[in-house]
Amino acid sequence: MMKLYYAAHTCALASHIALEDAGAEYSTVRIDFAAEEQRKPQYLAINPKGRVPALITERGILTETPAMLAFIAQSFPKAKLAPLDDPFAFAEVQAFNSYLCATLHVAHAHRMRGYRWADDPAAMEAMKRKVPDSVGACYELIESKMLRGPWVMGDSYTICDPYLFTVAQWMEGDSVDPARFPKVSDHRQRMSERAAVRKAIAEELG
């Protein structure tokens, strides 16, 4: 049985939802960021990066959300969470998830984790001020060019959908008005109505 290490209000929610979507047998372990459990030796032995999520599988430990989502989709092909029989379409799924990971999430992190990139308090404040613009620009691209509708890849639900839903929860905190992005907002609303999403959120916030 797999074990997911997560913290509430983080990108770990995407993998949590995907595990539910897949009908996987798994357990969860909550990492308390307020207590800095992610920096303690017990967790660093699991994920030396000191971040969440981490997924323990029978073959070893996986980190990084795009990799974990792909692993879940490939491990449970009957759930049809990715176009596994179409190399190009699967690459498109990977491209979308990589954009969320490498661009949107990084832009978001400038709001509260500027210390990763700078030591000067003024520089960190400048990064924080830029977040509404940089994150907003990411959603402009997603809205106009990447989100096909009704799901990210079109008619078929994929591992892109829980990932977009997860990061879209942070828009208001980043001072980005969801009303600017009706397709993203509609997607977020429909995702919130799914049983797997509700179950994962309830567990993480419980």
Image (spheres, helix red, strand yellow):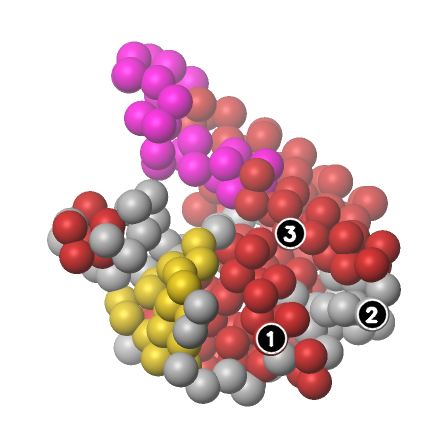
Kindly report the secondary structure that dominates the magenta region of the rendered protein.
helix
Q: Residue at x 23, y 53 (%)?
A: 45
In reply to whether residue 169 is colored magenta, the answer given is no
- Which residue in the protein does label 1 denote? 75
Q: Nearer the viewer, mark 3 or mark 2?
A: 2
Query: Residues in magenta?
Result: 103-126
Q: CA distance from mark 3 to mark 2?
A: 18 Å
Position of 15 relative to 141 (above/below): below
SS at badge 1:
helix
In reply to whether residue 110 is colored magenta, the answer given is yes
Q: Amino acid at mark 2?
A: Asp
- Which residue in the protein does label 2 denote? 85
Image coordinates of residue 178 in percent, x first then y, are 61, 51
Image coordinates of residue 13 in percent, x first then y, are 46, 65
Label disc, if present, on residue 97 of the rendered structure = 3
Q: Amino acid at mark 1?
A: Ser
Nearer-N-terminus badge (3/1): 1
Is residue 34 visible to the viewer in this orientation of the structure? no
CB atoms of marks 1 and 2 within 8 Å: no
Label disc, if present, on residue 38 of the rendered structure = none
Give left or right: position of 102 versus 42.
right
Quadrant of the rendered structure where residue 113 is? top left
